[in-house]
Amino acid sequence: MPGELHLGYRKRRADAPGKWLVRRYLGAVEKGKNPYQKETMGLADDYREADGVTVLSYADVQRRAHEWAAEASRGGAVTSPRHPTVRDVVDDYVRFLKAERRTGRDAERRADNFILPQLGSLKVAELTTERLVQWRDALAAAPARLRTRKGREQRYRPAPATPGDARARRATVNRTATVLKAALNRAFEHGRVNDDLAWRRLKPFDKVDVARPGHLSVAEAQRLINAADEESGFRDLAHGALLTGCRYGELFRLRVGDFQRGRIVVRESKSGKPRDVRLTDEAATFFRSLTSGRPADALIFAHADGSAWAKSHQARPMRDACTAAKIVPAVGFHQLRHTWASLAVMNGMPLMIVAENLGHRDTRMVERHYGHLTEDYRDEAIRNSGPRFGMTAPTNVVPLTEAQR
């Protein structure tokens, strides 16, 4: 009979939790029209404990279904009983990253600094492409933030003034927009919002990704290793980065038991997926010297007093090492990862192998940032391996030298 409610459960999949659904019978309708109104009530408590807000128990969904039906019977607009804000869906996304992938810190920082202050209070259903474009463009025109001590007034770089500054700023905004769109897409996929058109139409800034700057030559890397402070343990840490291409956070978490079969096992990475890092003979010898005879749960890299390296501990020793090694301009610790990748590409390592060691799913990131370095390698490969027929006509033309030009 009209008004009758039916509760349903959509089964959990490998890539998404289950959902609670409700269907309300409308009675006789015109031919060709659906006699039922349907609504997604929320996520089912089949992947984590119900909280009564985002994740619902059976009792929660019964209560919500009756509230929804009562609103309809009063003649009000039949809408979702929950209208999430941008803050709601971003917070849920960050919780998901931390729980499932252990890598929500960057997304949380971008959200707190750049997304939630401007958009957090808006309901997702109220978002328009125009509003998102305004947010994106304003963020690109604003000066970049500088590292500021907690409790101090936030410091900023000068506003983008050159084409290079504007490009770099837009590339940063693209990465922040990716976090926002990932949170919104998750809400849409889980039935919390009914339309994703507004952010599907939001396009990233084009032609802003360029080759990674700041990699060291072999000679500069050698000088840096020799100049790095040995007593504090920083020399081994920097040397390990240059031999593996691992991120700082991956290195300082490594335990002796993670060096096995001549490889490093990275158990906690940015992507949330563990990976094997393959080593050269030189790198394997280096790690063998650091781990031999030590307990499996001991840290491979530690301060001189045995305490663990932590966030930002590397910044000052890296600056000091660059100064002592006369590396100008100085590079940050992350450029040691770029150095490994750049030198590997220039030595002819297949891009897929480079990508796998760095922890990328495919070669796109490597091609985007290091692909230009393969040009000389390709030229050399053609010169060495291209077919020869011994039929080139002799010539007495001699190219001019640079001095003669």
Image: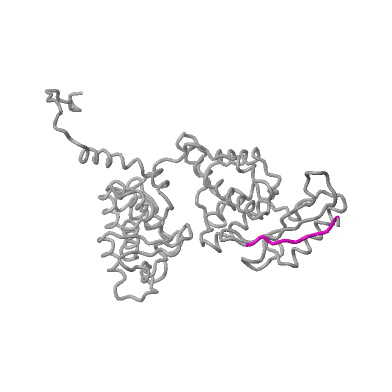
Locate the N terminus by quadrant. bottom right
Q: Is residue 19 left or right of residue 308?
A: right
Give percent across and percent down for residue 33.
78, 45
Q: Is residue 369 left or right of residue 227?
A: right
Give percent across and percent down for residue 197.
64, 42
Picture residue at 42% right of the left edge, 68% below the top: 308
Look at the picture and state if 360 lies above or below 234.
Answer: above
Give percent across and percent down for residue 207.
47, 36
Locate the C terminus by quadrant. top left
Q: Is residue 169 left or right of residue 50?
A: left
Picture residue at 17% right of the left edge, 24% below the top: 404
Q: Is residue 104 left or right of residue 390?
A: right
Q: Which residues are magenta?
A: 2-11
Picture residue at 43% right of the left edge, 65% below the top: 267
Give percent across and percent down for residue 295.
35, 76
How is colour applied across the structure in the image? one colour
Magenta-highlighted stretch: main secondary structure?
strand
Q: Residue 350: within the magenta?
A: no
Nearer to us in this view, 141 or 186 = 186
Kindly indicate the quadrant of the structure image that contains residue 372: top left
State the residue lying farthest toward the front. Answer: 31
Nearer to us in this view, 263 or 401 = 263
How many numbered badges does the structure rendering display?
0
Q: Residue 5: within the magenta?
A: yes
